[in-house]
Image (cartoon, rainbow, N blue to C red):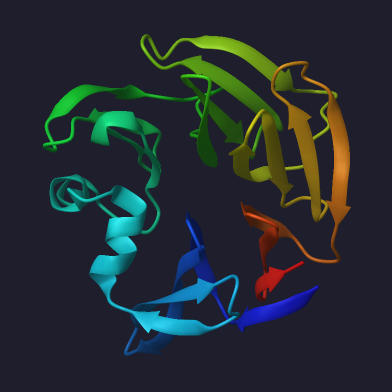
Amino acid sequence: MHKIFDGKVYDMIKKPDGIVFSYLEDVIDDNVLIKFKMFDAKSGIITDIAKNVYLLTKFGSNYKPAVDMCDNFITVKTINLPSGKLFLCKKDGSCYLLDSDGSVIWNGIILYRENPPSSIALYDNCIWASFEKDNVLIRFNIASMREELRIGGSKSPFSSPKGLFIEGNTAVVSNSGDGSLTKVNLDTYAVSRYYEFDKSVKSYIKVGIYEFVLLDDGIYQF
């Protein structure tokens, strides 16, 4: 495992050949300066990118109306859906489904025990959400947004699950509580320990054969 970026990172977003991320550049007179970078997984090259490249990756090609809806485009969670649709979830759990032209198809709220999701992901036409304070993963029907299935709870395999990444039928949960990654088979619901770190894990992304984690002190590839 080696560090590819040292500093305070707010979020990582997958792209076909690597990741983009937002990070703290400086604090000037109590004003936070946020900038953006891109990392190419194959070449190992990291480059500065413009804000619109970050927004394009996170929100899709019609990002302006989506960004206009957000109080904070960094903290909002997004899923780019087929046909150019976009699902976004704000920090308070309020959610919106946007059409390709930016118009709102549906809006509502996702909460569990009055807590909003810490992360969201798509699998088999369902929204999966992790809830950091309650140690659960929950599957929601994307049409009705009703809860269909829950994994975890009082005796949970998760420890403050902050991040959620899904590839194929496998979810990888980033446990901020004990610094581990947990795998969940979303067809059988089998749970297994995947990796452990000596720091809190905020998020995980896999791009081909390359794996990335966001820890307290930066981004690592392993």
Considering only vertical position in the picture, is 108 above or below 102?
Answer: above
Residue 73 shows in this picture: no
The residue closer to the viewer here, 142 or 131, is 142
Residue 88 percent coordinates (x, y):
34, 38
Residue 120 percent coordinates (x, y):
51, 36
Residue 7 percent coordinates (x, y):
58, 81
Considering only vertical position in the picture, is 155 above or below 23?
Answer: above
The residue sitting at 76% across, 78% down in the picture is 2
The residue closer to the viewer here, 149 or 111, is 149
Quadrant showing the N terminus: bottom right
Considering only vertical position in the picture, is 105 above or below 96?
Answer: above
Residue 75 percent coordinates (x, y):
40, 54
Considering only vertical position in the picture, is 135 above or below 119?
Answer: above
The residue sitting at 41% across, 88% down in the picture is 26
The residue sitting at 78% across, 16% down in the picture is 188
Q: Quadrant of residue 49?
A: bottom left
Q: Quadrant of residue 42?
A: bottom right
The residue sitting at 78% across, 37% down in the picture is 183
Quadrant showing the C terminus: bottom right
Residue 128 shows in this picture: yes
